[in-house]
Amino acid sequence: MLPVVDEENGQYLIYTDGWKDTWRDYACFFHVDVKENGTIYLRHDGTDLEVANQLVEKGIPKDEIVLAFHAPYKRELSGFGIS
């Protein structure tokens, strides 16, 4: 697994890139986008860690976490931020 850290733009990713026999293994496991106002956009969470819930347990309010992997019209049902 490879991390990508772009602190200037608030972008953080974890991905894999390599080969398994004759198959290319390339995938993004996790992508978070931290906006200047502090809102956290979870763009992709392909882990079993439930990162959004861990952030809440660390004291980040749910309305400051957007599950951006859901369509905007579905976000209001998540209990997290909507935009």
Image (tube, rainbow, N blue to C red):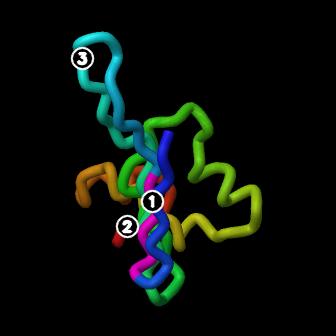
For label 2, the SS is: loop
Rounded to the nearest angstrom, the CA distance separating label 1 from label 3 is 23 Å
**13 lies left or right of 23:** right
Instruction: Return the x and y of residue 39 as percentages of the image width and height.
Output: 49, 77
Give the residue at the far top of this rendering. 21
Question: Is residue 39 or residue 32 the one in the foreground?
Answer: 32
Rounded to the nearest angstrom, the CA distance separating label 2 from label 3 is 38 Å
Which mark is first along the chain, 1 or 2? 1
Which mark is first along the chain, 3 or 1? 1
Instruction: Return the x and y of residue 49 as percentages of the image width and height.
Output: 61, 38
- Which mark's residue is nearer the viewer, 2 or 1? 1
Q: Residue at x 37, y 67 (%)?
A: 82
**Residue at label 2?**
82
Q: Using the image, tell me which numbered label, if any, was put on residue 47.
A: none
Query: Label 3 near label 2: C-beta < 8 Å?
Result: no
Say above or below: 46 vs 76.
above
**35 lies left or right of 61:** left
**Residue at label 1?**
4
Q: Residue at x 36, y 56 (%)?
A: 43
Magenta extent: 9-13
**33 lies left or right of 63:** left
Q: Which class describes the residues within 10 Å of circle 3: few (<14), some (14-19), or many (20+)?
A: few
Q: Amino acid at mark 2?
A: Ile
Give the residue at the far right of this rendering. 58
Q: Amino acid at mark 3?
A: Trp
Instruction: Return the x and y of residue 61 as percentages of the image width and height.
Output: 64, 70
Which mark is first along the chain, 3 or 2? 3
Q: Using the image, tell me which numbered label, if any, was put on residue 23.
A: 3
Q: Is residue 15 magenta?
A: no
Q: Which class describes the residues within 10 Å of circle 2: few (<14), some (14-19), or many (20+)?
A: many
Instruction: Return the x and y of residue 38 as percentages of the image width and height.
Output: 53, 82
